[in-house]
């Protein structure tokens, strides 16, 4: 197709699809009129059944925990896939790492806040990932924050330090433990004669306490490990692509 | 136990990644990956025979109460467990085949193959719309990365990009459809949505949600005009991966469409005859287009890819008949096709390993030193041509019976003859040196000669780890047909199809004389087409015109352009047409606005199985 033909066909087709979509959206209930039973049922039951006050976490790691296994492994596969595509090839030579700070000095106004915020980011990320039963986020968000802490170091111009803190072998191992740990927790329930991913850990007496939620904080912690390692690996791979010159 | 086919490969993948320092011991990786695949195949085999009726498995023990599901369910029946089992068998064959195949292969190849297998099993077994999407994506992400396994070359990167972008656009549209139907029904469980949809008159939302949900599946199953990515990806993907792409991934897309239709949308949409006809037209169109492209191709892997497209059209036609016999025929055809197509790709892989080319022109006569591979490849090609007793002939026979229309039978027969005939042409030319050496086409030769990076050097012998899986797959193709001819097995398959559709089983599954005759005619015709392709220049009427293999100009290449923008445009255009046609069908019979069912929060709560220990 010539670009012109393509544009004409695309415009016409897109208009048709948009009309279809508009027709469909017109059938949705009005704004604020949630029709389904799912939300109210969960709100009604979740705290009592799981002893987790973070109901979003209860849905993510308990009611629909099996989806989360899949989502976690999508990230796992994406990180592994990126390593495949961006791996150093047999006939490529790597030049010495170029320290970015010499050529392109990072101003102190970026450097100082980045380093100052690193500590608190680690703390908050850790809290989010390991206390999913009481806060509304859990491992995915917590893991992203943990990864951001390392990325702040990178942002401060310390790519070499960033790479030294996160060697590929370690990242792979952490990712594997995080992703595999989740799957194994489900398997333990199976070994106890329960359905896969059933909450086999005592739920604690007080909903919302640190010890409440059974497997929810455990799973969330493993997810946090996986997500943090995967994102650091991804950023690292891209960083290497731009900072290390590869010649074949 | 239904969770294990998904969980085992995931844990194995994590273990392999954790043990990356062990990657030097390549055989450990191979053993773990092949062993896990084989174990999954056995587990799924047990599931097929343990479930004579669909059994439902609730994760974390959240069983539905008052028709409301809060958890995720696997709904395991013979058909979906069987499809996953075929996938696991092909995965095992692919892993054994790659034992001596790759050289620079690291842990990541095995890890991604295992996550692909987990996604495949989850997609087949799940009974939840969103869960289906999750496993669909896991399968997709693994497949994109594996396609780009040789990033040092231009071809794989471009093929993988076409594959990833086209399929991702489809997946996003699917997710939009899921969001629409969830926004209206508040449910993700297939049975629960199905119950809601059949209680309400079909609305625009339901129709368009159906079209959008199957968008990603249409792209995956390479139905015209959503098919363009497939040949580009197959041509460049590592051969063991092509086995899975052609043997099972395309078919999974079709299974997804059938599942969405029968478990979720179909009963509520109504207008069954008209909707079936729409899919029948799509299927026949796909079969014709695939067969024509297949015939003109000289790049062996691309040729096999186009034959897959043609066969996907036949599968869709079988589903589109919307009768148990049609679906049972399609299921049997899928199984029979999976084994012989996998065998053909393994044969192509051996040729690539030994002769370092997949260019039919260059290979002409050079395959004579591979007599065993040649014989097995030819046998598999005859299986593709529906030769009895390969599983394909009976599947096709049932589809023909169910269609009950001579026109459909003849068109599908012609497509099979042309597609399988092209494969037989390759077999005759490459392995037996029959006919005239084809003319060299520069562009195609350049493309086909890029295919060298998979193995280290041409070996003098074909390793047993390559030829044994090939032989076993051909045998499995034969066994499928022989097993299905046993009346009890045929009836079991038919009743499984009827149960999948929640329809009564109307008739017994017979091996009719006409299906045997059609199979023989098809095989003979394919041999004829193959010979005609080889002796093209000696056929007086043609005088050498329209010879297959001239690429670079012409109408066909303007469609199959390799440009992603074109492919996406076709996806959007196809969806707009499908949406318009289905909307017209529903509209013509009158459309009542969807009534809102009042819902009472007070009397509903979900139940949890009491086996959980409480402090």
Image (cartoon, coloured by chain):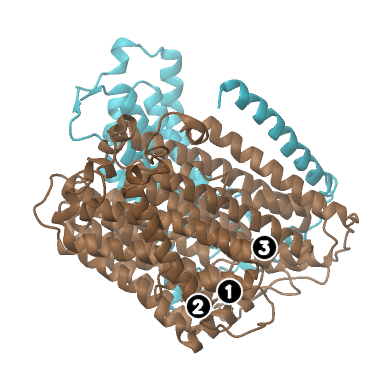
Chain colours: A cyan, B brown
Task: Give the alpha-carbon distance from disc 1 to disc 3, as whole Å.
Answer: 27 Å
State the mark number for residue A194.
2
Q: Is residue A71 left or right of residue B547?
A: right
Badge nearest the viewer, 1 or 3 = 3
Please give the chain letter of the residue carrying mark 2.
A
On the rendered image, what quadrant is the C terminus of chain B found in? bottom right
Q: Nearest the camera: B597 or A129? A: B597
Residue depicted at x 27% and y 41%? B361
Residue depicted at x 44% and y 40%? A146
Task: Give the alpha-carbon distance from disc 1 to disc 2, as whole Å.
Answer: 8 Å
Q: Are marks 1 and 2 in contact (CB under 8 Å)?
A: yes
**Visible residue check, residue B365:** yes
Instruction: Assess disc 1: are there few (<14), some (14-19) or many (≥20) residues with their C-alpha within 10 Å of its C-alpha.
Output: many
Q: Are marks 1 and 3 in contact (CB under 8 Å)?
A: no
Image spot of residue A38 (x, y percent): 73, 61
Q: Is residue B385 left or right of residue B126?
A: left
Please give the chain letter of the residue carrying mark 3.
B
Badge nearest the viewer, 3 or 2 = 3
Asked if residue B61 is positioned above or below residue B114 in the image, the reply reads below
Mark 3, secondary structure of its residue: helix
Q: Is residue B283 left or right of residue B244?
A: right
Residue depicted at x 63% and y 53%? A56
**Which residue is under mark 3?**
B261
Residue depicted at x 78% and y 38%? A19
State the mark number for residue B61.
1
Asked if residue B507 is positioned above or below residue B369 in the image, the reply reads below
Q: Are marks 3 and 2 in contact (CB under 8 Å)?
A: no
Task: Give the alpha-carbon distance from disc 3 to disc 2, as whole Å.
Answer: 33 Å
Instruction: Assess disc 2: are there few (<14), some (14-19) or many (≥20) residues with their C-alpha within 10 Å of its C-alpha.
Output: many
Residues marked 1 and 3, same chain: yes
């Amino acid at each position: 197709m010539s670009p012109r033909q393509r544009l004409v066909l695309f415009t016409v087709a897109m208009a048709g699809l948009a009309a279809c979509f508009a027709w469909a959206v017109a059938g949705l209930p009005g704004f604020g009129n949630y029709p389904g039973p799912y939300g109210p049922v969960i709100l009604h039951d979740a705290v009592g059944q799981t002893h987790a006050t973070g109901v979003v976490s209860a849905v993510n790691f308990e009611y629909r925990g099996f989806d989360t296994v899949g989502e976690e492994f999508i990230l796992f596969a994406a990180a592994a896939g990126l390593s495949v595509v961006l791996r150093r090839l047999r006939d490529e030579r790597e030049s010495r790492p170029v320290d970015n700070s010499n050529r392109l000095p990072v101003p102190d106004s970026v450097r100082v806040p980045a380093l100052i915020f690193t500590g608190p980011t680690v703390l908050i990320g850790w809290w989010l990932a390991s206390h999913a039963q009481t806060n509304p986020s859990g491992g995915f968000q917590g893991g992203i924050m943990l990864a951001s802490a390392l990325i702040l170091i990178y942002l401060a111009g310390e790519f070499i330090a960033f790479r030294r803190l996160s060697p590929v072998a370690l990242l792979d191992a952490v990712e594997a433990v995080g992703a595999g740990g989740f799957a194994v927790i489900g398997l333990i329930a199976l070994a106890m004669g329960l359905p896969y991913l059933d909450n086999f850990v005592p739920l604690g007496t007080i909903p919302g306490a640190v010890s409440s939620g059974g497997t929810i904080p455990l799973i969330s912690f493993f997810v946090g490990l996986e997500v943090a390692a995967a994102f650091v690996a991804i950023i690292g791979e891209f960083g290497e692509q731009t900072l290390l010159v590869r010649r074949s | 136990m239904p969770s294990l086919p998904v969980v085992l490969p995931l844990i194995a993948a994590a273990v392999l990644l954790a043990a990356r320092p062990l990657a030097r011991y390549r055989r450990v990786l191979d053993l773990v990956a092949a062993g896990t695949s084989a174990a999954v195949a056995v587990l799924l085999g047990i599931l097929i025979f343990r479930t004579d009726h669909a059994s439902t498995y609730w994760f974390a023990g959240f069983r539905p109460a008052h028709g409301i599901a809060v958890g995720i369910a696997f709904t395991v029946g013979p058909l979906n467990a069987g499809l996953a089992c075929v996938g696991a068998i092909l995965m095992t064959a692919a892993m054994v085949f790659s034992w001596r195949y790759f050289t620079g292969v690291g842990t990541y190849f095995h890890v991604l193959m295992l996550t692909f297998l987990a996604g495949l099993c989850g997609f087949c077994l799940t009974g939840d719309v969103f869960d289906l999407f999750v496993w669909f994506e896991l399968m997709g992400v693994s497949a994109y990365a594996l396609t780009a396994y040789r990033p040092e070359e231009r071809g794989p990167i471009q093929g993988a990009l076409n594959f990833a972008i086209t399929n991702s656009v489809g997946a996003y549209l699917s997710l939009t459809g899921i969001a629409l139907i969830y926004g209206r029904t508040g449910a993700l469980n297939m049975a629960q949505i199905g119950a809601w949809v059949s209680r309400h008159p079909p609305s625009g939302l339901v129709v368009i949600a159906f079209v959008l949900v199957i968008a990603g599946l249409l792209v995956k199953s390479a139905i015209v005009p959503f098919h363009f990515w497939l040949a580009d990806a197959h041509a460049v993907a590592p051969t063991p991966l092509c086995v899975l792409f052609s043997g099972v991934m395309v078919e999974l897309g079709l299974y997804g469409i059938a599942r969405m239709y029968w478990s979720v949308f179909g009963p509520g949409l109504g207008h069954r005859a008209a909707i079936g006809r729409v899919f029948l037209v799509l299927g026949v169109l796909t079969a014709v287009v695939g067969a024509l492209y297949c015939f003109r191709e000289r790049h062996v892997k691309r040729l096999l890819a186009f034959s897959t497209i043609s066969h996907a059209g036949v599968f869709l036609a079988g589903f589109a008949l919307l009768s148990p016999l049609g679906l049972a025929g399609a299921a049997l055809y899928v199984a029979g096709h999976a084994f012989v197509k996998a065998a053909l790709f393994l044969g192509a892989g051996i040729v690539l390993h030994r002769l370092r080319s997949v260019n039919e022109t260059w290979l002409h006569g050079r395959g004579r030193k591979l007599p065993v591979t040649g014989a097995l490849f030819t046998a598999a090609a005859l299986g593709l041509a529906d030769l009895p007793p390969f599983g394909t002939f009976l599947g096709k026979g049932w589809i023909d019976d169910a269609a009950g229309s001579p026109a459909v039978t003849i068109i599908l027969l012609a497509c099979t003859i042309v597609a399988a005939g092209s494969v037989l042409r390759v077999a005759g030319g490459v392995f037996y040196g029959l006919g005239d050496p084809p003319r060299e086409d520069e562009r195609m030769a350049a493309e086909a000669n890029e295919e060298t990076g998979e193995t280290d050097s041409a070996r003098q012998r074909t390793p047993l780890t390559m030829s044994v899986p090939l032989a076993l797959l051909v045998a499995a193709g034969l066994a499928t047909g022989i097993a299905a001819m046993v009346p009890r097995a045929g009836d079991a398959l038919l009743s499984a199809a009827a149960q999948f559709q929640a329809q009564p089983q109307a008739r017994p599954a017979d091996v009719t004389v006409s299906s045997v005759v059609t199979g023989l005619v098809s095989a003979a015709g394919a041999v004829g087409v193959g010979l005609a392709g080889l002796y093209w220049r000696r056929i007086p009427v043609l005088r050498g015109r329209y010879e297959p293999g001239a690429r670079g100009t012409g109408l066909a290449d303007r469609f199959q352009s390799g440009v992603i923008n074109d492919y996406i445009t076709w996806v959007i255009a196809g969806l707009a047409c499908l949406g318009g046609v289905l909307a017209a069908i529903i509209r013509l019979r009158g459309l009542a606005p969807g009534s809102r069912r009042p819902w009472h929060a007070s009397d509903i709560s979900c139940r949890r199985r009491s086996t959980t220990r409480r402090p």
